[in-house]
Image (tube, grey):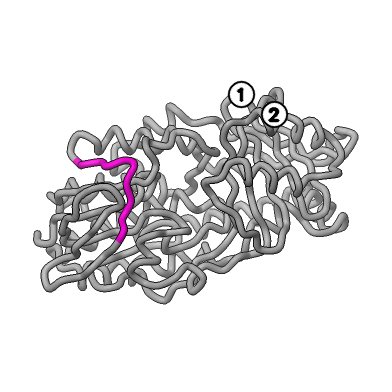
Amino acid sequence: MKNTKVLISGASIAGPALAYWLNRYGCDVTVVERAPELRTGGQAVDFKGATHLTVLERMGLLEEVRRRQTGGADQVIVDADGRRLAVMSGEFTGGEIEILRGDLALLLFERTAGDCEYVFGDSIRSLTETGGGVRVTFERGAPRTFDLVVGADGIHSNVRRLAFGPEERFVRFLGHYYALAQLDAGDGGQMYNEPGRMVALGGPKAPSFFVFASEPLDYDRSDVEQMRRILMDAYRGGRWRIPEVMSKLPEVPDIYLDSISRVEIDRYAEGRVVLLGDAAYGNTLGGFGSGLAVVGAYVLAGELAAAGGDHRAGFAGYEKAFRGYAKVARQGSAGPFLAPATPARIRMRNWIFKRRLLFGAMMRMTDRFATDIELKDYGRLG
């Protein structure tokens, strides 16, 4: 297999999952991550359907993921007086297996760190394609040349910006923001809505989760104080336990705030550079992000191996096999569902969870999206 020296940008889920498969196929893999260390926090992520579980099984991760699963707790939807209105079941929110994002990231890191090079606290500064590779300069490290470069660095992908063009050409804001904050909110498991905003209280291990409608915001995603102010402003005047929750935000050392947006790009590859995960498929918060990342990594590595390392053929195979499956990321946004715009829409959303037939139809549709790919067995190549 040729083109075996590969640089992956991003050490969350997609990047280490790809590193696992590429290493298995004999590649020399380097993973660069802007954060100073592995990010072990974050919300729960889930896997659903035979396709997701088959890939986890082929990675030898399925039983370990099952062992660490959170259980997919129900969310009790309440009114401003704390009265129960409906239940968003753990089956709906947590798929077949739910695991904390940080636990999954750690599992993937542990499976790859011994055979792959990880460089934390650095980022790609420039990419220059040459006749036989890609010359990469870094913010801190010395320049290096790689055969292939993979952008697995999220919806605000630095690799996509450098190789394809500015973010505003490919990322479409969908009218909502979401935030995560680890705060002491008791046992959690309760969710409350007001028009255009939602708060779901987390437990001792899971962060509280916020979704709110907004015009586009201009802020620094590394500035915790700025994100704290945005979140407090968004929930000002709220009822139920919102004042209590907001009063605790100043004590929270870290807050994650980002837009609910969709990536709209007509190709995953540009020369020797290819995109994977949210960098390619977007982040609509529909519950498929981790599944797309893990299955996408499996398909990308497998197609490259099947093509003997020929990046043109391998990238084309990945695009052909995966684009139809990734269309689930274009099926709308979770924002209006989680934070409906009017009291009537909030009531309608709650009503769905009280109707078994409607809920069953939603679950069947979710299963269809999760399994809508012919999963090749690339095992003989490794």
Instruction: Check disc 2 and give the amino acid type.
Output: Gly
Q: Is residue 205 above or below residue 146?
A: above
Magenta stretch, main secondary structure, is strand
Visible residue check, residue 91: no
In the rendered structure, the answer to whether residue 169 lies left or right of residue 376 reads right
Q: Is residue 194 above or below residue 332?
A: above
Secondary structure of the residue carrying tag 1 is loop
Foreground residue among 36 and 281 = 36
Visible residue check, residue 11: yes
Foreground residue among 33 and 55 = 33
Of the numbered discs 2 and 1, the one sitting upstream in the chain is 2
Give coordinates of residue 36: x percent, y percent. Answer: 37, 38
In the rendered structure, the answer to whether residue 350 lies left or right of residue 258 reads right
The residue beneath circle 1 is 204
Give coordinates of residue 57: x percent, y percent. Answer: 33, 41
Where on the picture, by quarter, is residue 77? top right
Seen as rendered, the residue at the extreme right is 81
The residue beneath circle 2 is 188
Foreground residue among 344 and 367 = 344
**Disc 2 from disc 1: Cα separation:** 8 Å
Q: Residue at x 39, y 54 (%)?
A: 153
- Which stretch appears magenta? 116-125
Give coordinates of residue 102: x percent, y percent. Answer: 45, 35
CB atoms at circles 2 and 1 under 8 Å apart?
Answer: yes
Neighbour tally class for label 2: few under 14, some 14-19, many 20 plus, Cα within 10 Å: some
Q: Is residue 278 above or below residue 39?
A: below
